[in-house]
């Protein structure tokens, strides 16, 4: 499909500088884009390519001041990165909208129901009493267990496994290989040293506008619900344990693990490979640096780092002091020698 700069500007509320009739048919990175492609500049690191790129249309920030002449047509917006993401989303939506109908072979229980413009790929399994909303896409080899509810405009990618009783809201994307609703890790120690399994009879609730990366696991609650609240974004390879709550618009990077019954507030940012113990709370707006081990609750708005994690600013000061240890050791030895000399002179 081909789009004119004028059409793109309307979609992202942008102002055109150059030829409004300039057309593009695909996207390209600014450093390697060819003629007929759309690109963007948001990171100053790539500023030099603005003047040499072959891209036909470029999205830039409204306050960007040109240092040289630019050959491409520019579209100025308040936030180039967000505008470009919006366009990619609309493009992806157009591509997926073309997928409708039920491929064969697939299994759909007689008690299952689905809305309009739904796509169900080959070898998908749709269990008893499943409800799938309008415009949702279930890709091949997905497993949707009994009594699962999936809202409108959801995308369930290949190989996703959604266990019974899971509730998924609208506009949720789940990437390949993710497992939602498997048993929480609950075992009661016995007097003889063995462990008795605690049945996990709760469920998982995924609210609206959540995105879950590939090969992530979200355990069902022991009782009650494990909840991923609206707008949260989970990366690949994350473990969310039973009865955890992840707050609205919180982001969690790859390989993080959250232990059972921990509550994470809204707008928190959790870096890659973070480990969080169970039964604590992470406050609204908290920031946890990558590879931190969090063993106690974190106050709202606080940034922590390290293992065990502690105040981020204090940690930076400690690191600065640590780098100076060789110099400090040398000064201590010099002072010790001076003290010995002074003592010897007094004798």
Image (tube, rainbow, N blue to C red):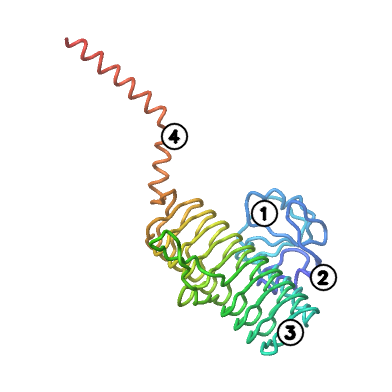
Element class at badge 2: loop
- Marks 2 and 1, how far apart in space? 27 Å
Q: Which residue is mark 3?
A: 117
Q: Which residue is mark 1?
A: 66
Q: Which residue is mark 4?
A: 323
Dot 2 alpha-carbon crowd within 10 angstroms: few under 14, some 14 to 19, many 20 or more: few
Label 3 near label 1: C-beta < 8 Å?
A: no
Quarter placement of the N terminus: bottom right
**Mark before the other along the chain sequence, 1 or 4:** 1
Which x, y percent locates residue 67?
67, 50
**Mark before the other along the chain sequence, 3 or 2:** 2
**Mark before the other along the chain sequence, 4 or 2:** 2
Element class at badge 4: helix
The answer to whether any part of residue 246 appears in the image is no
**Mark before the other along the chain sequence, 4 or 3:** 3
Quarter placement of the C terminus: top left
User: Relative to 47, does residue 227 appear above or below in the rendering?
Assistant: below
Which x, y percent locates residue 343?
20, 14
- Marks 3 and 2, how far apart in space? 24 Å
- Marks 1 and 3, how far apart in space? 46 Å
The answer to whether any part of residue 184 appears in the image is yes
User: Relative to 157, does residue 72 appear above or below in the rendering?
Assistant: above
**Mark before the other along the chain sequence, 2 or 1:** 2
State left or right for residue 310 relative to residue 56.
left
State left or right for residue 330 relative to residue 175.
left
Residue at 47% of width from left, 63% of height from top? 268
Q: Name the residue furthest left.
A: 347
Q: Nearer the viewer, mark 4 or mark 3?
A: 3
Q: Which residue is mark 2?
A: 2
- Marks 4 and 2, how far apart in space? 56 Å
């Amino acid at each position: 499909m081909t789009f004119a700069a004028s059409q793109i500007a309307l979609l992202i509320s942008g102002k055109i500088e150059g030829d409004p009739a300039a057309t593009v048919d695909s996207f390209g990175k600014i450093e390697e884009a060819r003629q007929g492609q759309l690109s963007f500049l948001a990171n100053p690191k790539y500023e030099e390519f603005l003047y040499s790129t072959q891209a036909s249309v470029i999205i830039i920030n409204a306050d960007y001041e040109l240092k040289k002449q630019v050959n491409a047509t520019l579209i100025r917006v308040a936030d180039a990165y967000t505008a470009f993401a919006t366009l990619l989303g609309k493009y992806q939506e157009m591509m997926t909208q073309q997928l409708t109908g039920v491929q064969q072979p697939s299994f759909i229980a007689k008690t299952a129901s689905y809305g309009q413009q739904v796509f169900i790929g080959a070898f998908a399994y749709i269990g008893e009493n499943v409800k799938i909303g309008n415009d949702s896409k279930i890709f091949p080899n997905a497993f949707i267990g009994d009594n699962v509810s999936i809202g409108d405009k959801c995308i369930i990618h290949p190989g996703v496994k959604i266990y019974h009783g899971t509730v998924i809201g609208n506009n949720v994307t789940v990437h390949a290989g993710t497992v939602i609703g498997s048993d929480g890790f609950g075992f009661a120690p016995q007097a003889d040293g063995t462990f008795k399994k605690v049945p996990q009879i709760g469920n998982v609730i995924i609210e609206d506008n959540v995105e879950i990366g590939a090969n992530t696991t979200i355990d069902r609650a022991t009782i009650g619900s494990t909840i991923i609240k609206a707008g949260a974004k989970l990366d690949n390879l994350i473990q969310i344990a039973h009865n955890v709550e992840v707050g609205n618009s919180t982001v969690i990077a790859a390989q993080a693990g959250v232990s059972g019954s921990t509550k994470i507030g809204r707008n928190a940012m959790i870096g890659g490979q973070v480990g969080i113990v169970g039964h604590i709370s992470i406050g609204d707006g908290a920031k946890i640096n990558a590879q931190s081990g969090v063993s106690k609750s974190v106050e709202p708005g606080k940034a922590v780092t390290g293992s065990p994690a502690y105040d981020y600013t204090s940690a930076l000061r400690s690191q600065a002091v640590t780098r100076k240890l060789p110099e400090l050791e040398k000064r201590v030895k010099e002072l010790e020698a001076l003290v010995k000399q002074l003592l010897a002179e007094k004798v």
